[in-house]
């Protein structure tokens, strides 16, 4: 419920230089509004964005393919990472915390 309220009040301002229809990976927990995005990775090999909940246990079938604009509509705060270079990720403890970068 808290995630839903957060989405209502946080207006999406798409900032990524990648086109809105750029394919990205999101876990089913995030897509089904069961968990918040707590880990973001920008893959060095292919430039793919991944938006994950941070749970340790994920199966291959938990990965879902959506567009980058859809991911930013799920959680507009990921727009803060629009300049994150390839090979870098970011994590946070909750949706209220600041993103902390890390090297993939």
Image (cartoon, rainbow, N blue to C red):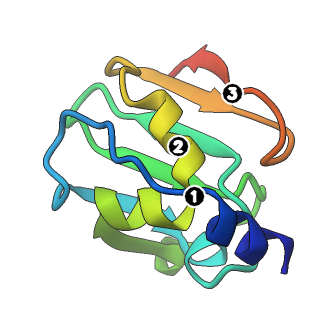
Mark 2 closeness class: few <14, some 14–19, many ≥20 residues within 10 Å: many
- Distance of label 1 from label 2 (alpha carbons): 6 Å
What residue is disc 3 on?
99
The answer to whether residue 104 is left or right of residue 83 is right
Name the secondary structure under disc 3.
loop
Q: Quadrant of residue 10?
A: bottom right
**Residue 12 on image: x %, y %:** 46, 55
- What label sits on residue 52 in the rendered view? none
| Residue designated by label 1 | 75
**Does residue 56 appear anywhere in the picture?**
yes
- State how far apart marks 3 and 1 are (Cα): 13 Å
Q: Are marks 2 and 3 in contact (CB under 8 Å)?
A: no
Q: Quadrant of residue 25?
A: bottom left
Q: Which residue is mark 2?
A: 78
Q: Are marks 1 and 2 in contact (CB under 8 Å)?
A: yes
Which label's residue is closer to the chain start, 2 or 3? 2
Nearest the eye: 62 or 12: 12
Q: Is residue 64 above or below residue 76?
A: below
- The structure residue drawn at horizontal position 53% and vertical position 67%, both measured from the top left corner, is 74
Check disc 2 and report its element: helix, strand or loop: helix
């Amino acid at each position: 419920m808290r995630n839903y309220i957060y989405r209502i009040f946080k207006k999406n301002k798409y900032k990524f230089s990648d086109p809105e229809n750029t394919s990205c990976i999101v876990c089913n927990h995030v897509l089904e509004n069961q968990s918040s995005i707590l880990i973001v990775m920008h893959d060095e090999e292919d430039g793919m964005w991944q938006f994950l909940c941070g749970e340790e246990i994920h199966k291959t079938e938990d990965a879902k393919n959506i567009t980058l604009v859809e991911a930013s509509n799920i959680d507009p705060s990921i727009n803060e990472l629009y300049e994150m270079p390839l090979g870098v990720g970011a994590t946070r403890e909750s949706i209220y915390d600041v993103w902390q970068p890390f090297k993939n």
